[in-house]
Image (cartoon, rainbow, N blue to C red):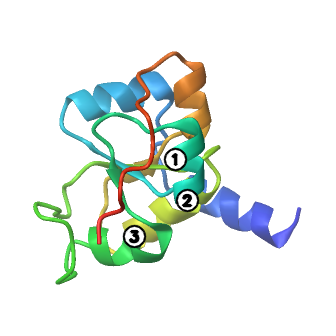
Amino acid sequence: MTAIDTRLADARSTLDRADPARAADLQAAGALLVDIRPHENRLAEGEIPGSVVVERIHLEWRLAPDSEWRLPGVTTDTVAVVVCNEGYASSLAAADLQRLGLRRATDLAGGFRAWAAAGLPVQPGGSPAVP
């Protein structure tokens, strides 16, 4: 097993990962879906309606419950589902968010591509990231 495989397994051991249907249910119940994919991917493939785009480089500052730069309303109890292309980078990011106090952070298993393949709603991409 490589070092990154070990790191990914460790990260996922702390997550209650959501498949696309469950992620949609969580979003309908008020969870925050956070798209960390690069702008080019969002332009080419689209976005999940109602998701919030946060560039990966800003993620921890926007979602750490005690950060002065956090998104409005983010608390330790916020349910946040991190979305990347295929569900790898999002696992690492969600585990980082848990370590920062966002205890209900998780990720979308299979990423945006699994969401789209499940036939869930997709809108044209290109939304600006939260500054």
- Which percent across, then down, holds residue 28? 23, 28
Quadrant containing the C terminus in the rendered view: bottom left
Q: Could you give the CA–CA distance between mark 2 and mark 1, rounded to whole angstroms?
A: 7 Å
The residue wearing badge 2 is: 38
> Between 115 and 23, which is closer to the camera in this rendering?
115
Q: Amino acid at mark 2?
A: Pro
SS at badge 3: helix
Mark 2 → mark 3, Cα distance in angstroms: 13 Å
Q: Residue 95 versus residue 117: which sits nearer the camera?
A: 117
Q: Position of residue 19 (x, y in %)?
A: 51, 30
Q: Is residue 117 above or below residue 9?
A: above
For the residues bearing labels 2 and 3, Cβ distance under 8 angstroms: no
Looking at numbered disc 1 in the image, what kind of residue is underneath it? Arg
Label 1, secondary structure: give it.
Answer: helix
For disc 1, the marked residue is 42
| Label 1 crowd (10 A; few <14 / some 14-19 / many >=20) | many
